[in-house]
Amino acid sequence: MFCIVRRETLNPILQMTEEIYNETLIMIEDMCLLIANKVLSCLGMTAPNRHMHDALNHELQREQQYDIEALAETVRTNVPQLNQQQRIAYDTLIEAVNSGSGGIYFLDAPGGTGKTFLISLLLARIRSRNDVALALASSGIAATLLEGGRTAHSALKLPLNMQITETPICNIAKNSAMAKILQVCKLIVWDECTMAHKRSLEALDRTLKDLRDNHNIFGGAMILLSGDFRQTLPVIPDQLLLMN
């Protein structure tokens, strides 16, 4: 686990300190809470001090570790390759980011038409200015296609019992690094959102309103949802697949 901390801070010679040890315990306990809903003290291990100052803040560092010059070159090279519809979407979304007005946008297009390419350029443009853009996806495969991408369940700490929880929220403390990211990010992308349970989006909405102290939808943050309902099969409860 210490190797994970070392890797995420991009410091291969990082030495063990009390803060790092505590951070590692927190990471282990978060996993135990997610898997078994038990804290470390219940498992016979040392409990972390969650009130200790987060000296690493590796989550925030992760979102600010990009090569700005390389990203700017990526934008300069690839924006001219956008087709007309992609360019309209790109300009509209960048203008919305620059205005800081927030809002919800949905990128709808069939598979293979360049949604990931467009999203990657949006992320590169925002990060090239040293701003924070959070890349989420409903599936692990979709997350790997985005620079810095991760699954929504992992990043947002969504509850596992989504179907039976009427008003779910993300398990993100206000003083955590992820809370800071959600407070300052210029854009939150959720790819393959058509695969997500609607309560996952509702959980993010409640969490952003709380963290940003803003009662507008999604706390006034700018949200880009992307997906293709054409690839989403209908779900019929208690039914079996009929083979003709």
Image: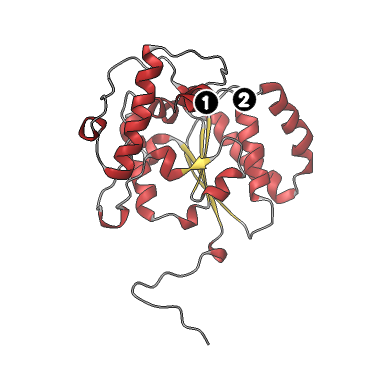
Q: Residue at x 69, y 28 (%)?
A: 71
Which numbered dot is residue 82?
Answer: none
In the rendered view, tell whether residue 153 sits above or below residue 236.
above
> Which amino acid lies under the numbered mark 2 shown in the image of this protein?
Tyr
- Label 2 SS: loop
- Residue drawn at x 33%, y 42% is 34
Outermost front residue: 44
- Relative image position of residue 66 (x, y in whole percent): 62, 25
Q: Quadrant of the N terminus?
A: top left
- The structure residue drawn at horizontal position 59% and vertical position 22%, both measured from the top left corner, is 130
Examine the rendering and report whether any part of residue 19 can be seen.
Answer: yes
Residue 235 in which image quadrant: bottom left
Q: Circle 2: is it few (<14), some (14-19), or many (20+) Cα within 10 Å?
A: some
Residue 66 is labelled as 2
Mark 1, other Cα within 10 Å: few <14 / some 14–19 / many ≥20 = some
Q: Nearer the viewer, residue 115 or 17?
A: 17
Q: Nearer the viewer, mark 2 or mark 1?
A: 1
Can you say whether 87 is above or below 128 in the image? Answer: below
Q: Quadrant of residue 10?
A: top right
Dot 1 amino acid type? Glu
Name the residue at the left extreme. Answer: 42
N-terminal of the pair, mark 2 or mark 1, is 1
The answer, for residue 215, to whether it is visible in the render is no
Residue 100, percent across and down? 50, 30
Viewed as shown, does residue 145 lie left or right of 26? Answer: right
Residue 212 pos. (x, y %)? 36, 29
Percent x, y of residue 200: 37, 49
Answer left or right for 191 relative to 241: right
- Name the one closer to the observer, 91 or 130: 130
The residue carrying mark 1 is: 8
Which secondary structure lies at badge 1? helix
